[in-house]
Image (cartoon, rainbow, N blue to C red):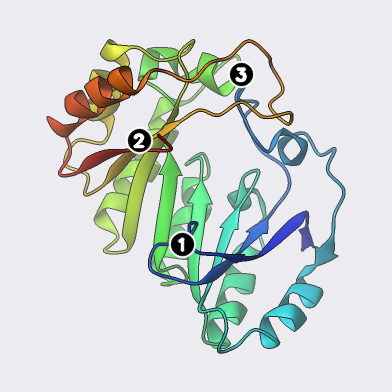
Amino acid sequence: MIIHGLQKMTLLDFPEHVACTVFLGGCDFRCPFCHNFGLADGTDKPVMDDRELIGFLKTRTGILDGVAFTGGEPCLHRDLPELLEEIRSLGFGTKLDTNGYHPALLKEILERGLVDYVAMDIKNSPAKYAATCGVAMIDMKTIEESISLIMKSGTGYEFRTTVVDEFHESADFRGIGKLIEGAEKYYLQCFTDRPSVPFGNLHAPSKEKLEEYAGIARTYVKFAAVRGV
């Protein structure tokens, strides 16, 4: 497996773990607000392969206790389960970030117990999902299947939405709430503009708007909070 980035240590990406973050290339979506667009469209160059990653991890036993996989979309890689299994055999916990558009591989990973935690992005309410993902069409049944798999898996999880003023409004969080109704944890992440974001003139919502949206979400989920403010 080709790896496009490695953050050697993080205290933020994997709850309750000192972890490294592995970035995999490729994505089904072209979200206009994506911070990792070079991974999504394949322009970022690889930095190592899976054998080099395993070699790195063997030097970090006792220092790191987790490995988080993000992208891009990790579930585009059919050999991901085998790599997760090998990493777990070294004694590391594992976390997966996903857009939820590959439920078959997600199901395999969950059923084999290959991750300790899953974070799934919920892009928007169903009516605005495709536009928020930067694509012409979205099969919402695929998204709903992944949501259901995660919620029923017994694996630790969270759902999260990157909130962009141009893409989100109050009504959207009622739509999102219905998608993930009963979920344990939901986070609203405030958009931050960076040079890697592919489209300009996007803005973060105000703190007041974010708190309003979180309040709407709390009527549907067990816990909702704002990140990045």
Number of the label disc, if any, that sits on residue 132: none
Residue 127: percent from left, percent from top: 39, 12
- Which numbered disc, 2 or 1, marks the residue that appears first in the sequence? 1
Tell me the mark number nearer the camera, choosing from 2 and 3. Answer: 3
Q: Amino acid at mark 1?
A: Phe
* Residue that appears at 38% across and 68% down: 16
Tell me the mark number nearer the camera, choosing from 2 and 1. Answer: 1
Badge 1 is on which residue?
A: 14
- Which numbered disc, 2 or 3, marks the residue that appears first in the sequence? 3
Badge 3 is on which residue?
A: 135
The quadrant the N terminus occupies is bottom right
* Residue that appears at 46% across and 62% down: 14
* Residue that appears at 61% across and 26% down: 193
Real-space CA distance between mark 1 and mark 3, rounded to the nearest whole angstrom: 29 Å
Instruction: Give 129 or 139, whichever is nearer the viewer.
Output: 129
Badge 2 is on which residue?
A: 144
Q: Is residue 129 left or right of residue 225?
A: right
Q: Are marks 1 and 3 in contact (CB under 8 Å)?
A: no
